[in-house]
Amino acid sequence: MEDLDINSLEQELSPAKKFSDDDTHAVRALKTAMQKNLYRKYLSMLGIPDSRIIKDYIYYYINGTNSSIGPQYVFMCREKLQPSKWYYRHDEELPERIEFKPKYSWECMRSMETEGLRRLVELRKEHTAKGLEEKFGISFYQVKNILYKRLDPISGKEIYKIFPQKELIIKLRGVINPDYWFIFPDELV
């Protein structure tokens, strides 16, 4: 009987470690960290809490199981990984990084107006709901749901109904830099 020679086996990368043409700059960086067996360390260095659930969620996004990344995770690592990197493919040129001085945690995203929301309000005034739909393919209801605030039954605070989804941020990235969705106006330098 012959011993199995480990060197004769070809290494098969998991789908999460293989590069794809659709990878964003951020996903490509995370896949590189995985290939170097530094995934969890890299996430910790980015500011993602040391939670298996959170790190597994991001892993499932990278390998395609989850269709989009939660905005709270983009916010958590915004100081060390430009938010735009989540919304531009690796072969697309990134916009200039917006400089800011962080003052708030990700929990504030639900109740406070980000610079991106402020700019969306201005854009809506400029184009009207019908104009937004014609020019950017954004429905009135998408904008309404993003700008609508309701009372949180648990905290009693006014909070936004939803955060803009990945598709909307991508549609508007020509007029609203994706970084602005994760920065509050008084944090801008």
Image: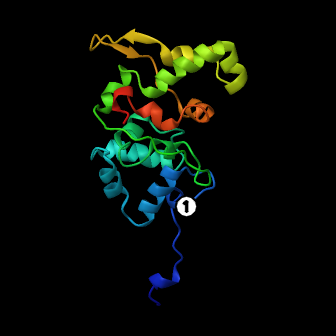
Coloration of the structure image? rainbow
Q: Provide residue 168's location: percent of width, then percent of height.
A: 58, 29
Q: Provide residue 88's location: percent of width, then percent of height.
A: 57, 45
| Residue farthest toward the bottom in the current orientation of the protein | 1
Q: Which corner quadrant of the image does residue 20 belong to?
A: bottom right
User: Can residue 108 be seen by looking at this rendering?
Assistant: yes
Q: Is residue 82 left or right of residue 54?
A: right
SS class, disc 1 = loop
Toward the viewer: 174 or 14?
Answer: 174
Task: Give the residue displayed 52% in from the left and 84% down from the top.
Answer: 8
Residue 1 against residue 167 in the figure, above or below = below
Q: Say which amino acid is labelled 1.
A: Lys
Task: Give the residue displayed 46% in from the left and 62% down from the top.
Answer: 32
Q: Is residue 97 left or right of residue 142?
A: left
Q: Provide residue 114's location: percent of width, then percent of height.
A: 41, 26
User: Can residue 141 be seen by looking at this rendering?
Assistant: no
Residue 39 against residue 143 in the figure, above or below = below
**Number of numbered discs overlaid on the protein picture:** 1
Q: Provide residue 62's location: percent of width, then percent of height.
A: 49, 49
Task: Give the residue displayed 42% in from the left and 61% down from the top.
Answer: 33
Residue 5 against residue 75 in the figure, above or below = below
| Residue farthest toward the front in the current orientation of the protein | 189
Q: Which corner quadrant of the image does residue 73 belong to?
A: top left
Toward the viewer: 78 or 152?
Answer: 78
Q: Label 1: which residue? A: 18
Residue 46 against residue 168 in the figure, above or below = below
Task: Give the residue displayed 35% in from the left and 44% down from the top.
Answer: 79
